[in-house]
Image (tube, rainbow, N blue to C red):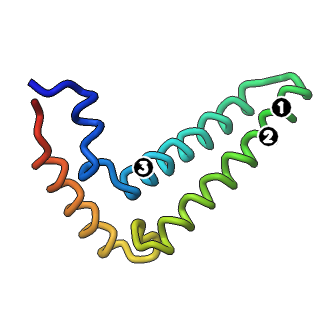
Amino acid sequence: MASIIDKLNNKELITDQVIATDLLVTAKAAVRSYAVAITETASPSLHKTLKAQLDEAIEAHHKIATYMIEREMYHAYDLEEQIEHDLKKADVALDMPTS
């Protein structure tokens, strides 16, 4: 039985696209989290700090998305192409070994 470390070391499964997609999803989550946190704080200094962090998270998201778009990993301007791309990735995920 292969350990999780063995699976993570499988270079064929961990590609630049997988890493970039994970970063993009994480950046989106950070943007949402900072936006919610800003609406929940009453402290002006904390609000200012969170807003600065939100701006950095938005910039990070933009850089990651641009990287992916330029390398045709993310088709933000063509929904049909993105759906086809996602379906192919889903097929790859379904074919991954589970044990």
Q: Are marks 2 and 1 in contact (CB under 8 Å)?
A: yes
What residue lies at 74% left-to-right and 33% top-to-bottom?
A: 38
Which kind of residue does numbered mark 1 sit on?
His
Locate residue 12, reporting x and y percent.
Answer: 24, 52
Q: Quadrant of the N terminus?
A: top left
Quick one: label 2, few (<14), some, or many (20+) residues within 10 Å?
Answer: some
Looking at the rendered structure, the secondary structure element under dot 1 is helix
Q: Determine whether 66 is above or below 9 in the image.
A: below
Quick one: label 1, few (<14), some, or many (20+) residues within 10 Å?
Answer: some
What residue lies at 22% left-to-right and 35% top-to-bottom?
A: 7
Tell me if 99 is positioned left or right of 21 in this view: left
Q: Quadrant of the C terminus?
A: top left
Tell me if 65 is positioned left or right of 98 in this view: right
Which kind of residue does numbered mark 2 sit on?
Lys
Looking at the rendered structure, the secondary structure element under dot 3 is helix
Calculate the distance from the C-alpha at mark 2 to the C-alpha at mark 1: 6 Å
Q: Earlier in the sequence, mark 1 or mark 3?
A: 3
Q: Point out the frontmost of discs 3 and 2.
A: 3
Which kind of residue does numbered mark 3 sit on?
Ile
In the picture of the structure, the residue carrying the numbered disc 2 is: 51
How many tags in the picture?
3
Calculate the distance from the C-alpha at mark 3 to the C-alpha at mark 2: 27 Å
Q: Determine whether 32 is above or below 78 in the image.
A: above
What residue lies at 42% left-to-right and 49% top-to-bottom?
A: 19
Q: Are marks 3 and 2 in contact (CB under 8 Å)?
A: no
Q: Quadrant of residue 46?
A: top right
Q: Residue furthest right?
A: 45
In the picture of the structure, the residue carrying the numbered disc 3 is: 19
Q: Quadrant of residue 36?
A: top right
Q: Which mark is residue 47?
A: 1
Looking at the rendered structure, the secondary structure element under dot 2 is helix
